[in-house]
Amino acid sequence: MENRKIMALGKSSLVISLPKNWLKMNNVDRGDVVSLEILRDLSLVVHPTMKTGEREKRKIVVIEPEEEEDTIIRIVIGCYLNGYSTIQLTSKKIFTTRQHKAIRDVVKSLYLRIIESHASEVILQTLMDESMASVEQGLDRMHLITLSMCEDILVAMETWDGDLAGSVLSLEDDVDQFMYYLIRLIRCAAIDPSLAGNLGLDILDCLDYQNLVDRIERVADHTTNLAQHLVNLVEHQGVIPLNVWAVFIEVARLSFDSYEKAVEGFILKTVQDSNTIINNQEKVGQLFRKISPLPSFGINDRAVFLELSAIREDIMRISEYAADIAEILIDRAYKPEAK
Protein backbone atom coordinates (compact mmCIF):
# COMPACT_ATOMS: atom_id res chain seq x y z
CA MET A 1 0.00 0.00 0.00
CA GLU A 2 1.25 3.45 -0.91
CA ASN A 3 0.50 6.72 0.86
CA ARG A 4 -0.23 9.75 -1.31
CA LYS A 5 -0.46 13.35 -0.18
CA ILE A 6 -3.56 15.30 -1.17
CA MET A 7 -2.65 18.50 -2.99
CA ALA A 8 -4.68 21.59 -3.78
CA LEU A 9 -5.38 22.53 -7.39
CA GLY A 10 -6.94 25.94 -7.64
CA LYS A 11 -9.32 27.18 -4.99
CA SER A 12 -11.65 24.18 -4.61
CA SER A 13 -10.11 21.07 -6.21
CA LEU A 14 -8.06 18.48 -4.34
CA VAL A 15 -5.96 15.96 -6.29
CA ILE A 16 -3.61 13.03 -5.77
CA SER A 17 -1.08 11.56 -8.21
CA LEU A 18 -1.43 7.99 -9.50
CA PRO A 19 1.39 5.43 -9.06
CA LYS A 20 3.57 5.07 -12.17
CA ASN A 21 3.56 1.27 -11.93
CA TRP A 22 -0.24 1.20 -11.90
CA LEU A 23 -0.37 3.49 -14.95
CA LYS A 24 2.08 1.24 -16.79
CA MET A 25 0.33 -2.01 -15.89
CA ASN A 26 -3.04 -0.67 -17.08
CA ASN A 27 -1.66 1.16 -20.12
CA VAL A 28 -3.09 4.46 -18.88
CA ASP A 29 -1.59 7.75 -20.05
CA ARG A 30 -2.22 11.48 -19.85
CA GLY A 31 -5.63 12.38 -21.24
CA ASP A 32 -7.16 8.91 -20.66
CA VAL A 33 -10.34 8.59 -18.63
CA VAL A 34 -10.58 6.52 -15.43
CA SER A 35 -13.65 5.65 -13.37
CA LEU A 36 -13.98 6.29 -9.64
CA GLU A 37 -16.20 4.19 -7.38
CA ILE A 38 -17.06 4.64 -3.71
CA LEU A 39 -17.44 1.28 -1.97
CA ARG A 40 -19.63 0.33 0.98
CA ASP A 41 -16.74 0.89 3.43
CA LEU A 42 -16.27 4.41 1.92
CA SER A 43 -12.97 3.47 0.27
CA LEU A 44 -12.36 4.78 -3.25
CA VAL A 45 -11.49 2.51 -6.18
CA VAL A 46 -9.93 3.75 -9.42
CA HIS A 47 -10.84 1.71 -12.51
CA PRO A 48 -8.93 2.10 -15.79
CA THR A 49 -11.20 2.44 -18.82
CA MET A 50 -11.27 -0.93 -20.55
CA LYS A 51 -10.55 -1.04 -24.25
CA THR A 52 -12.69 -3.22 -26.51
CA GLY A 53 -12.05 -6.90 -25.85
CA GLU A 54 -10.15 -6.35 -22.58
CA ARG A 55 -13.10 -7.33 -20.42
CA GLU A 56 -13.14 -10.86 -21.77
CA LYS A 57 -11.23 -13.29 -19.59
CA ARG A 58 -9.92 -16.08 -21.77
CA LYS A 59 -8.08 -19.21 -20.66
CA ILE A 60 -6.26 -21.56 -23.03
CA VAL A 61 -5.63 -25.05 -21.67
CA VAL A 62 -3.56 -27.70 -23.45
CA ILE A 63 -4.96 -31.20 -22.93
CA GLU A 64 -2.66 -34.19 -23.15
CA PRO A 65 -3.80 -37.02 -25.47
CA GLU A 66 -3.90 -39.47 -22.55
CA GLU A 67 -5.63 -37.05 -20.14
CA GLU A 68 -8.29 -38.75 -18.02
CA GLU A 69 -11.91 -37.60 -18.45
CA ASP A 70 -12.25 -36.72 -14.75
CA THR A 71 -9.19 -34.48 -14.98
CA ILE A 72 -10.65 -32.61 -17.96
CA ILE A 73 -13.89 -32.09 -16.04
CA ARG A 74 -11.97 -30.69 -13.05
CA ILE A 75 -9.98 -28.35 -15.35
CA VAL A 76 -13.14 -26.94 -16.93
CA ILE A 77 -14.82 -26.49 -13.54
CA GLY A 78 -11.69 -24.78 -12.16
CA CYS A 79 -11.58 -22.34 -15.09
CA TYR A 80 -15.30 -21.64 -14.75
CA LEU A 81 -15.12 -21.01 -10.99
CA ASN A 82 -12.24 -18.59 -11.48
CA GLY A 83 -14.28 -16.32 -13.69
CA TYR A 84 -13.06 -17.08 -17.20
CA SER A 85 -15.66 -16.14 -19.80
CA THR A 86 -14.03 -18.16 -22.59
CA ILE A 87 -12.25 -21.49 -22.09
CA GLN A 88 -10.27 -22.86 -25.02
CA LEU A 89 -9.35 -26.55 -24.74
CA THR A 90 -6.65 -27.63 -27.18
CA SER A 91 -5.41 -31.18 -27.65
CA LYS A 92 -1.85 -31.94 -28.72
CA LYS A 93 -3.34 -34.52 -31.09
CA ILE A 94 -7.10 -34.99 -31.28
CA PHE A 95 -9.73 -35.40 -28.56
CA THR A 96 -10.86 -38.96 -28.02
CA THR A 97 -14.56 -39.83 -28.05
CA ARG A 98 -14.51 -40.16 -24.25
CA GLN A 99 -12.76 -36.80 -23.84
CA HIS A 100 -15.36 -35.11 -26.06
CA LYS A 101 -18.14 -36.72 -24.02
CA ALA A 102 -16.55 -35.53 -20.76
CA ILE A 103 -16.43 -31.96 -22.08
CA ARG A 104 -20.08 -32.08 -23.17
CA ASP A 105 -21.14 -33.58 -19.85
CA VAL A 106 -19.46 -30.88 -17.76
CA VAL A 107 -20.89 -28.13 -19.98
CA LYS A 108 -24.38 -29.37 -19.08
CA SER A 109 -23.69 -28.93 -15.36
CA LEU A 110 -22.39 -25.37 -15.75
CA TYR A 111 -23.67 -22.15 -17.30
CA LEU A 112 -21.52 -22.82 -20.37
CA ARG A 113 -22.07 -23.47 -24.06
CA ILE A 114 -19.86 -24.88 -26.80
CA ILE A 115 -19.33 -22.20 -29.43
CA GLU A 116 -16.71 -24.08 -31.50
CA SER A 117 -15.86 -27.75 -31.67
CA HIS A 118 -13.12 -29.33 -33.76
CA ALA A 119 -11.12 -32.55 -33.61
CA SER A 120 -8.33 -30.92 -31.60
CA GLU A 121 -10.00 -27.82 -30.17
CA VAL A 122 -13.15 -26.98 -28.22
CA ILE A 123 -14.08 -23.45 -27.20
CA LEU A 124 -16.50 -22.91 -24.34
CA GLN A 125 -18.23 -19.68 -23.42
CA THR A 126 -20.08 -18.76 -20.25
CA LEU A 127 -23.75 -17.81 -20.38
CA MET A 128 -23.41 -15.69 -17.25
CA ASP A 129 -23.47 -11.92 -16.99
CA GLU A 130 -22.14 -11.26 -13.51
CA SER A 131 -23.36 -7.66 -13.58
CA MET A 132 -26.96 -8.91 -13.89
CA ALA A 133 -26.65 -11.78 -11.41
CA SER A 134 -27.98 -12.03 -7.86
CA VAL A 135 -26.47 -14.11 -5.07
CA GLU A 136 -29.69 -13.95 -3.05
CA GLN A 137 -31.90 -15.22 -5.89
CA GLY A 138 -29.50 -18.03 -6.78
CA LEU A 139 -29.20 -19.03 -3.14
CA ASP A 140 -32.97 -19.03 -2.70
CA ARG A 141 -33.48 -21.32 -5.70
CA MET A 142 -30.72 -23.68 -4.62
CA HIS A 143 -32.25 -23.90 -1.15
CA LEU A 144 -35.79 -24.49 -2.44
CA ILE A 145 -34.65 -27.41 -4.61
CA THR A 146 -32.75 -28.95 -1.69
CA LEU A 147 -35.71 -28.43 0.65
CA SER A 148 -38.02 -30.06 -1.92
CA MET A 149 -35.68 -33.06 -1.97
CA CYS A 150 -35.88 -33.30 1.83
CA GLU A 151 -39.68 -33.08 1.82
CA ASP A 152 -40.03 -35.75 -0.87
CA ILE A 153 -37.68 -38.10 0.97
CA LEU A 154 -39.67 -37.73 4.18
CA VAL A 155 -42.90 -38.65 2.37
CA ALA A 156 -41.14 -41.56 0.68
CA MET A 157 -39.93 -42.83 4.07
CA GLU A 158 -43.42 -42.59 5.54
CA THR A 159 -45.08 -44.38 2.60
CA TRP A 160 -42.22 -46.60 1.39
CA ASP A 161 -42.57 -44.99 -2.04
CA GLY A 162 -39.52 -46.09 -4.02
CA ASP A 163 -40.53 -44.15 -7.13
CA LEU A 164 -40.75 -40.88 -5.19
CA ALA A 165 -37.36 -41.56 -3.62
CA GLY A 166 -35.94 -42.31 -7.06
CA SER A 167 -37.23 -38.99 -8.43
CA VAL A 168 -35.06 -37.16 -5.89
CA LEU A 169 -31.87 -38.52 -7.47
CA SER A 170 -32.22 -36.39 -10.61
CA LEU A 171 -32.52 -33.14 -8.64
CA GLU A 172 -28.93 -33.25 -7.41
CA ASP A 173 -27.69 -32.00 -10.81
CA ASP A 174 -29.87 -28.88 -10.47
CA VAL A 175 -28.41 -28.16 -7.03
CA ASP A 176 -24.86 -28.64 -8.34
CA GLN A 177 -25.50 -26.20 -11.20
CA PHE A 178 -26.61 -23.50 -8.78
CA MET A 179 -23.68 -24.32 -6.51
CA TYR A 180 -21.12 -23.77 -9.30
CA TYR A 181 -22.95 -20.62 -10.42
CA LEU A 182 -22.90 -19.13 -6.93
CA ILE A 183 -19.32 -20.10 -6.12
CA ARG A 184 -18.15 -18.49 -9.38
CA LEU A 185 -20.10 -15.33 -8.58
CA ILE A 186 -18.78 -15.16 -5.01
CA ARG A 187 -15.15 -15.80 -6.03
CA CYS A 188 -15.35 -13.10 -8.69
CA ALA A 189 -16.85 -10.66 -6.19
CA ALA A 190 -14.05 -11.39 -3.70
CA ILE A 191 -11.42 -10.06 -6.14
CA ASP A 192 -13.53 -7.45 -7.95
CA PRO A 193 -14.63 -4.59 -5.66
CA SER A 194 -16.90 -3.17 -8.37
CA LEU A 195 -18.80 -6.45 -8.79
CA ALA A 196 -18.95 -6.89 -5.00
CA GLY A 197 -20.49 -3.44 -4.74
CA ASN A 198 -23.09 -4.25 -7.40
CA LEU A 199 -23.98 -7.45 -5.54
CA GLY A 200 -24.08 -5.70 -2.17
CA LEU A 201 -21.32 -7.90 -0.74
CA ASP A 202 -18.18 -7.26 1.25
CA ILE A 203 -15.33 -9.70 1.87
CA LEU A 204 -16.97 -11.17 5.00
CA ASP A 205 -20.20 -11.72 3.05
CA CYS A 206 -18.22 -13.61 0.41
CA LEU A 207 -16.77 -15.94 3.05
CA ASP A 208 -20.15 -16.51 4.72
CA TYR A 209 -22.02 -17.10 1.47
CA GLN A 210 -19.40 -19.52 0.18
CA ASN A 211 -19.63 -21.53 3.43
CA LEU A 212 -23.43 -21.49 3.22
CA VAL A 213 -23.48 -22.67 -0.41
CA ASP A 214 -21.07 -25.48 0.49
CA ARG A 215 -23.30 -26.65 3.37
CA ILE A 216 -26.47 -26.60 1.25
CA GLU A 217 -24.74 -28.62 -1.47
CA ARG A 218 -23.61 -31.19 1.11
CA VAL A 219 -27.15 -31.47 2.48
CA ALA A 220 -28.34 -32.16 -1.08
CA ASP A 221 -25.59 -34.78 -1.50
CA HIS A 222 -26.59 -36.65 1.66
CA THR A 223 -30.28 -36.39 0.75
CA THR A 224 -29.45 -37.98 -2.61
CA ASN A 225 -27.51 -40.76 -0.86
CA LEU A 226 -30.44 -41.27 1.49
CA ALA A 227 -32.80 -41.56 -1.49
CA GLN A 228 -30.65 -44.25 -3.09
CA HIS A 229 -30.45 -46.26 0.14
CA LEU A 230 -34.22 -45.98 0.56
CA VAL A 231 -34.78 -47.29 -2.98
CA ASN A 232 -32.56 -50.26 -2.09
CA LEU A 233 -34.52 -50.90 1.11
CA VAL A 234 -38.06 -50.85 -0.29
CA GLU A 235 -38.10 -54.57 -1.10
CA HIS A 236 -36.83 -55.36 2.42
CA GLN A 237 -39.26 -53.16 4.34
CA GLY A 238 -40.96 -56.19 5.88
CA VAL A 239 -37.91 -57.13 7.97
CA ILE A 240 -37.56 -53.69 9.57
CA PRO A 241 -39.49 -53.35 12.86
CA LEU A 242 -42.07 -50.55 12.81
CA ASN A 243 -40.72 -48.98 16.00
CA VAL A 244 -37.22 -48.82 14.54
CA TRP A 245 -38.36 -47.25 11.27
CA ALA A 246 -40.52 -44.76 13.22
CA VAL A 247 -37.35 -43.45 14.91
CA PHE A 248 -35.64 -43.04 11.53
CA ILE A 249 -38.61 -41.00 10.29
CA GLU A 250 -38.68 -38.88 13.45
CA VAL A 251 -34.97 -38.10 13.26
CA ALA A 252 -35.14 -37.35 9.53
CA ARG A 253 -38.01 -34.91 10.14
CA LEU A 254 -36.02 -33.23 12.92
CA SER A 255 -32.89 -32.89 10.77
CA PHE A 256 -34.78 -31.58 7.73
CA ASP A 257 -36.64 -29.09 9.92
CA SER A 258 -33.32 -27.88 11.37
CA TYR A 259 -31.94 -27.40 7.87
CA GLU A 260 -34.99 -25.44 6.71
CA LYS A 261 -34.97 -23.14 9.74
CA ALA A 262 -31.21 -22.59 9.53
CA VAL A 263 -31.25 -21.41 5.90
CA GLU A 264 -34.40 -19.34 6.36
CA GLY A 265 -32.79 -17.74 9.42
CA PHE A 266 -29.76 -16.85 7.28
CA ILE A 267 -31.92 -15.35 4.54
CA LEU A 268 -34.15 -13.43 6.98
CA LYS A 269 -31.19 -12.51 9.25
CA THR A 270 -32.83 -13.84 12.39
CA VAL A 271 -30.99 -15.89 15.02
CA GLN A 272 -34.15 -16.88 16.86
CA ASP A 273 -33.87 -20.65 16.27
CA SER A 274 -30.07 -20.91 16.00
CA ASN A 275 -29.35 -22.40 19.44
CA THR A 276 -32.22 -24.88 19.09
CA ILE A 277 -30.84 -26.03 15.73
CA ILE A 278 -27.36 -26.51 17.17
CA ASN A 279 -28.74 -28.40 20.20
CA ASN A 280 -30.80 -30.66 17.93
CA GLN A 281 -27.59 -32.51 17.07
CA GLU A 282 -27.56 -34.00 20.55
CA LYS A 283 -31.24 -34.88 20.27
CA VAL A 284 -30.56 -36.69 17.00
CA GLY A 285 -27.83 -38.72 18.70
CA GLN A 286 -30.08 -39.58 21.65
CA LEU A 287 -32.90 -40.83 19.40
CA PHE A 288 -30.56 -43.03 17.39
CA ARG A 289 -29.03 -44.46 20.57
CA LYS A 290 -32.51 -45.72 21.49
CA ILE A 291 -32.36 -48.19 18.58
CA SER A 292 -28.71 -49.15 18.89
CA PRO A 293 -27.30 -51.63 18.22
CA LEU A 294 -29.65 -52.48 15.34
CA PRO A 295 -29.11 -56.28 15.54
CA SER A 296 -30.62 -56.27 19.04
CA PHE A 297 -33.90 -55.14 17.42
CA GLY A 298 -34.01 -58.15 15.12
CA ILE A 299 -32.18 -56.67 12.14
CA ASN A 300 -29.82 -59.49 11.23
CA ASP A 301 -29.84 -59.22 7.45
CA ARG A 302 -26.42 -57.80 6.52
CA ALA A 303 -27.67 -55.86 3.47
CA VAL A 304 -30.50 -54.25 5.46
CA PHE A 305 -28.15 -53.43 8.34
CA LEU A 306 -25.70 -51.68 5.99
CA GLU A 307 -28.44 -49.66 4.27
CA LEU A 308 -29.93 -48.54 7.60
CA SER A 309 -26.49 -47.62 8.93
CA ALA A 310 -25.85 -45.52 5.83
CA ILE A 311 -29.21 -43.76 6.18
CA ARG A 312 -28.45 -43.04 9.83
CA GLU A 313 -25.11 -41.51 8.84
CA ASP A 314 -26.73 -39.33 6.14
CA ILE A 315 -29.37 -38.01 8.53
CA MET A 316 -26.74 -37.20 11.17
CA ARG A 317 -24.60 -35.34 8.61
CA ILE A 318 -27.62 -33.26 7.52
CA SER A 319 -28.21 -32.28 11.15
CA GLU A 320 -24.55 -31.29 11.50
CA TYR A 321 -24.63 -29.11 8.38
CA ALA A 322 -27.79 -27.42 9.65
CA ALA A 323 -25.92 -26.64 12.87
CA ASP A 324 -22.98 -25.27 10.83
CA ILE A 325 -25.36 -22.90 9.03
CA ALA A 326 -26.82 -21.80 12.37
CA GLU A 327 -23.33 -21.00 13.64
CA ILE A 328 -22.60 -18.94 10.51
CA LEU A 329 -25.83 -17.08 11.18
CA ILE A 330 -24.84 -16.29 14.78
CA ASP A 331 -21.42 -15.05 13.62
CA ARG A 332 -23.09 -12.76 11.07
CA ALA A 333 -25.37 -11.32 13.74
CA TYR A 334 -22.32 -9.75 15.40
CA LYS A 335 -20.64 -8.64 12.19
CA PRO A 336 -19.45 -4.98 12.30
CA GLU A 337 -21.82 -2.71 10.44
CA ALA A 338 -20.64 -0.98 7.29
CA LYS A 339 -19.90 2.70 7.75
Image: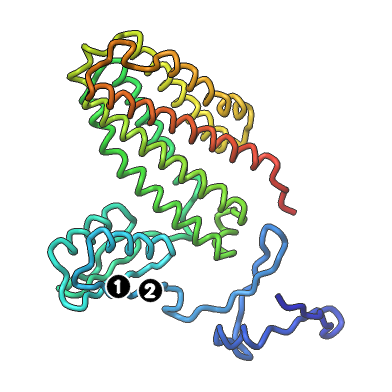
Q: Name which residue lies at 47% across and 29% down.
A: 319
The residue at which mark 1 appears reads as 88
The answer to whether residue 141 shows anywhere in this view is no
Check the image and report above or below for 244 versus 325.
above
Q: Is residue 15 rendered to the left or right of residue 115?
A: right
Check the image and report above or below for 218 versus 238.
below
The amino acid on which the numbered mark 2 sits, given as a three-letter code, is Arg
Q: Position of residue 24 (x, y in %)?
A: 58, 88
Say which mark, if any, is on residue 58: 2
Q: Name which residue lies at 55% across and 78% down.
A: 49
Q: Residues within 10 Å of mark 2 (few under 14, many from 20)?
A: some
Colouring convention used in this rendered image of the protein: rainbow
Say which mark, if any, is on residue 246: none
Q: Position of residue 63 (x, y in %)?
A: 25, 72
Q: CA distance from mark 1 to mark 2?
A: 8 Å
The answer to whether residue 77 shows anywhere in this view is yes
Q: Name which residue lies at 60% across and 86% down.
A: 32
Marks 2 and 1: in contact by CB < 8 Å?
yes
Q: Residue 101 or 32: which is nearer the viewer?
A: 101
Q: Name which residue lies at 38% across and 74% down.
A: 58
Q: Secondary structure at mark 1?
A: strand
Q: Residue 270 or 62: which is nearer the viewer?
A: 62
Q: Is residue 6 rendered to the left or right of residue 223?
A: right
Q: Position of residue 193 (x, y in %)?
A: 59, 64
